Image (spheres, rainbow, N blue to C red):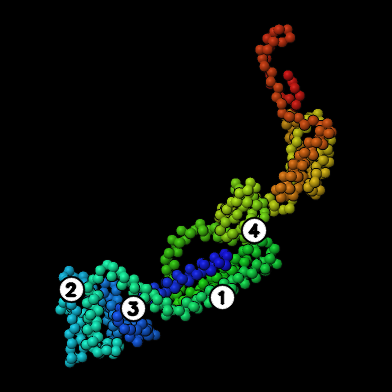
């Protein structure tokens, strides 16, 4: 993974984490309406996670917040009020105006709609929001009336968009220290990952001496640092890893099936880099492809074929295929078949061929070249010439070609016939020397001489 790709990937991950945490905060915290002043203790939580304030919801939108009272928490109180409001909204009859009824004796006020009590405004509420019971009750009644009057589509969309953006900006500003901390962690992770990757590459170069292993060690070190840095940065952002892992656990089976080929390619790539059946620059045969290994990645292996094409083979296919590595050793054996006439002396022909082969440039003295009688064919004796040459394809083919040429020229100079497969066909019903019709037909196999 290149550094800029890693930064781009991790930046996307951090941005997703920011959006996730801010969105999560938007659902768990208590936003206010546009015109409502926020109490000094809004959005606070005690150590036992009891809420001091909770939202009053109308048609999915928060209108204002109510606090806790003696004997009842804010969340439980808001649930009761919300249930009353929802039951009135669901009724087919039209909603009237929310009215305020003061009780000076008890110093409280009640908000009523359609002769039903929605909620009670107490002195504790007045102290929480810094105003009198009457003023606060009238304020909340006005806000409920505006919420009950369903706005136009454009206005509703605009308000929702404005509330969402303002909440996001507010949450982002409140989390600015966490975001700056995550950015610092990203920078430190990038710097440290580069250093670890370089050290791993140098260490592998000194201990292994294989380019494929060096690449594997460098990538594992670089990626491992990014994984740790990701965990730290997302922790700085306040992401709940327990909830995240729980959500991933529910979808792990689907993810596994959906990305099984991708995971298989990466795992196969790691095994190939560790097992090293071939290295960069090796000339191999994988399935129907033959060429030079130019790149070994965690996902695919790249081969440059001898006819000038570049082939990307998924590592899963490479791992499961039979691999022929032609350059695993510096030398490999080549062979040439040549036929001599039955009348020729085999020992003499073998010595002539050996003398010619050893003089060819590129043929190795060890192992010693050899000439074997391979087959007694119909028209000739087939000899197989074996010799060792450079395993690189160009040198292999060039040396084999020179050996073929040297063998032919040496046998011709020694007068040893190299017969060809010629068949003589004799047709029947042809007149003989006495003028009689010859009704016999024969086919004879020759050794290079005409038998007509």
How far separated are the C-alphas under marks 3 and 1? 35 Å
How far separated are the C-alphas under marks 3 and 2? 25 Å
Q: As displayed, is residue 209 above or below residue 427?
A: below
Q: Which circle marks residue 95 in the picture?
A: 2
Secondary element type, mark 1: helix
Disc 4 vs disc 1: Cβ atoms closer than 8 Å?
no
Q: Which residue is mark 1?
A: 188
How far separated are the C-alphas under marks 4 and 3? 59 Å
User: Which residue lies at the image location 47% right of the left edge and 78% below the top edge?
Assistant: 178
> Is 276 displayed left or right of 18 in the figure?
right
Q: Which circle marks residue 31 in the picture?
A: 3
Q: Of the residues tagged 4 and 3, which is closer to the observer?
A: 3
Q: Position of residue 421 (x, y in %)?
A: 71, 28
Q: As displayed, is residue 413 above or below residue 236?
A: above
Question: Is the residue marked by circle 2 packed among few (<14), some (14-19), or many (20+) residues within 10 Å?
Answer: some
**Among the two numbered marks 2 and 1 on one chain, the one whose residue lies closer to the N terminus:** 2
How far separated are the C-alphas under marks 2 and 1? 59 Å
Q: Quadrant of the C terminus?
A: top right
**Among the two numbered marks 3 and 1 on one chain, the one whose residue lies closer to the N terminus:** 3
> Which one is in front, 344 or 220?
220
Disc 3 vs disc 2: Cβ atoms closer than 8 Å?
no
> Is 199 displayed left or right of 118 in the figure?
right
Secondary element type, mark 4: loop
Question: Is the residue marked by circle 3 packed among few (<14), some (14-19), or many (20+) residues within 10 Å?
Answer: many
Disc 2 vs disc 1: Cβ atoms closer than 8 Å?
no
**Among the two numbered marks 4 and 3 on one chain, the one whose residue lies closer to the N terminus:** 3
Can you see residue 245?
A: no
Q: Which residue is mark 4?
A: 276
Q: Quadrant of the N terminus?
A: bottom right
């Amino acid at each position: 993974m290149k550094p800029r790709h890693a930064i781009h990937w991790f930046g996307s991950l951090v941005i997703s984490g920011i959006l996730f945490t801010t969105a999560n905060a938007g659902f768990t915290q208590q936003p206010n309406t546009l015109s409502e002043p926020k109490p000094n203790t809004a959005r606070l939580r005690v150590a036992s996670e009891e809420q001091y304030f909770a939202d009053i919801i109308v048609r999915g939108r928060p209108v204002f917040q109510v606090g806790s009272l003696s004997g009842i928490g804010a969340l439980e109180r808001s649930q009761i009020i919300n249930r009353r409001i929802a039951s009135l909204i669901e009724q087919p009859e039209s909603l009237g105006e929310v009215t305020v009824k003061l009780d000076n004796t008890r110093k409280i006020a009640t908000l009523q709609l359609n002769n039903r009590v929605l909620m009670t405004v107490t002195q504790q509420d007045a102290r929480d929001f810094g105003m009198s019971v009457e003023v606060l009750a009238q304020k909340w009644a006005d806000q409920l009336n505006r919420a009950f009057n369903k706005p136009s589509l454009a206005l509703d969309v605009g308000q929702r968009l404005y509330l969402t953006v303002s909440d996001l900006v507010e949450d982002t500003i409140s989390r600015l220290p966490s975001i700056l901390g995550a950015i610092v962690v990203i920078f430190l992770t990038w710097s440290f990952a580069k250093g670890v990757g370089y050290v791993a590459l140098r260490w592998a170069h000194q201990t292994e001496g294989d380019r494929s292993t060096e690449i594997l060690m460098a990538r594992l070190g670089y990626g491992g640092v990014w994984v740790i840095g990701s965990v730290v940065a997302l922790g700085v952002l306040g992401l709940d890893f327990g909830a995240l892992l729980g959500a991933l656990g529910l979808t792990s089976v689907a993810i596994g099936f959906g990305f099984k080929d991708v995971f298989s390619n990466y795992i196969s790539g790691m095994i190939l880099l560790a097992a090293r059946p071939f290295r960069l620059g090796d000339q191999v045969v994988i399935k129907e492809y033959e060429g030079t290994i130019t790149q070994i990645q965690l996902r695919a292996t790249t081969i440059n074929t001898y006819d000038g094409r570049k082939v990307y083979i998924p590592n899963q296919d490479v791992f499961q295929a039979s691999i022929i590595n032609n350059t695993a050793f510096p030398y490999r054996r080549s062979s040439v078949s040549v036929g001599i006439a039955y009348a020729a002396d085999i020992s003499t022909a073998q010595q002539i061929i050996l003398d010619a082969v050893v003089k060819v440039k590129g043929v190795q003295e060890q192992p010693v070249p050899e000439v074997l009688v391979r087959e007694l064919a119909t028209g000739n004796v087939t000899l197989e010439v074996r010799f060792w040459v450079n395993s690189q394809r160009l040198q292999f083919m060039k040396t084999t070609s020179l050996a073929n040429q040297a063998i032919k020229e040496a046998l011709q100079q020694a007068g040893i016939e190299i017969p060809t497969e010629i068949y003589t066909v004799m047709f029947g019903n042809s007149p003989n020397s006495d003028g009689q019709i010859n009704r016999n037909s024969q086919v004879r196999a020759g050794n290079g001489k005409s038998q007509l």
